[in-house]
Image (spheres, rainbow, N blue to C red):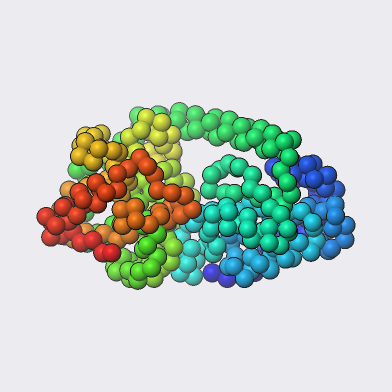
Amino acid sequence: MFRPDPVLYQHALGDAPDWVRAVADSLEATRLVEQGFEAHGSGEQADDAEVGSTLVASDRVLHWLDEAAVARALDAAHRVASFGVFRIATRYSAGPLVDGLNEFASVHDAEWWRERIAAVFGHAETIENTPREYCVIVTAPVDAALAAKVADLQKRAKRRATWMRRRQRLAGRLWRVVRRTVSERRLLQELTGKHVALVGNAASLAERDYGRAIDAADIVVRCNRGILVAAHSHGSRTDWVVTGLPISRETAKARGIQRIIWVSRRAKMMRNMPAWMFASGRLHIFSKARDRHLARELGKTASTGMKAIDLLAASDCARLNIYGFDFGASHSASQPTRPMSPDHDFDAERRRALLLIESDERLTLLR
């Protein structure tokens, strides 16, 4: 995907987000420049005047760029300001592919971004931030006052998120009354005689060329956020998603998702299921009996991928090809900059999955 280099425009400090104003106040900045793909604020392009009192704010910009464009964008920001604050995604977009690639061109952890920014500005520190899929980096020492302000903003954001979840819970309870979920029997009947591709999130899948084979299946099932890294490795279709993570209505529409299989049985996650999923008529909730049976066999809570294999193998599908499963050997594409969850026993899952595959000729694990 091609993105033009971002531009730098004047922006009124008073109109900046709270987290940007907090950094500006800490640095005593008197001038704010925004880095983005289109003009905001006054619409006047920034120059290198008053560099010492200027702060550049780059909000969710750099991860759209390849590494060469990132370097150019940082150099351009440093020319107009001594200080900058950058909010950057640290995981892939859950949206559809653009020109055969994930729309986020640079996906790295916070330390990678900190080092790149420090190399240009001379100093950079990571501020803990919300939500977790972003890092916020400032090119000045973080003093106690700024740290306290950021912590306060995090608390406010958490309170807002809590109230939103409570409203979702109420709406979800109402929809549960008027709209029944899809039964397991009906769900599995839809797979009868079908060629099914189950696509996991192992980072190692990006090194393969299974995309065409995946898209050739009758039904393509993906796990959790259903990340698409590239068409050649992951394919581009998503018909069903097996998940324990909330998915937005907009993402489901953009991806063309027809069935949502919710697998988390934790009380907190069950309460926080998005109301729109119930309203859609597309939702199946993984049975408590299956969940408990797997947990007893594995000794720990089964991962989303293991639950997907167990459920789909119970159908009368003609074929089940399994891609992107290496049972913890590589990171997850859903959270590529974070370690694998300790909540699951991936060795036990590998053993169970291989026994199931060896005993059922319909199942094939493609490594």
- x, y percent for residue 334: 43, 52
Work out which quarter of the rendered image holds the C terminus and state it: bottom left
Is 214 left or right of 120, judged from the image as shown?
left
Is residue 21 shown to the viewer in this render?
no
* Residue located at (38% from left, 68% from top): 207
Where residue 89 appears, as percent x and y from the top left, is 56, 53
Q: Nearer the viewer, residue 321 or 126?
A: 126
Vertical arrangement, residue 181 with respect to residue 94, above or below: above
Q: Quadrant of residue 216?
A: bottom left
Residue occupying the point 45% across, 28% down: 170
- Residue 145, compared with residue 1, is above or below; it is above
Quarter placement of the N terminus: bottom right
Residue at 29%, 48% in the rendered image: 346
Give the quadrant of residue 196.
bottom left
Viewed as shown, does residue 109 lie left or right of 278?
right
Residue nearest the observer in this picture, 110 or 325:
110
Residue 315 x, y percent position in the rendering: 18, 50
Residue 275 placement, left or right of 28? left
Looking at the image, the residue that sits furthest to the right is: 50
- Name the residue located 30 percent from the left edge and 38 percent from the top edge: 301
The relative height of residue 155 versus residue 199 in the rendered view (above or below) is above
Q: Nearer the viewer, residue 238 or 179?
A: 238
Percent position of residue 147, x then y:
69, 37
Decide if residue 272 is in sight here.
Answer: yes
Q: Quadrant of residue 307?
A: top left
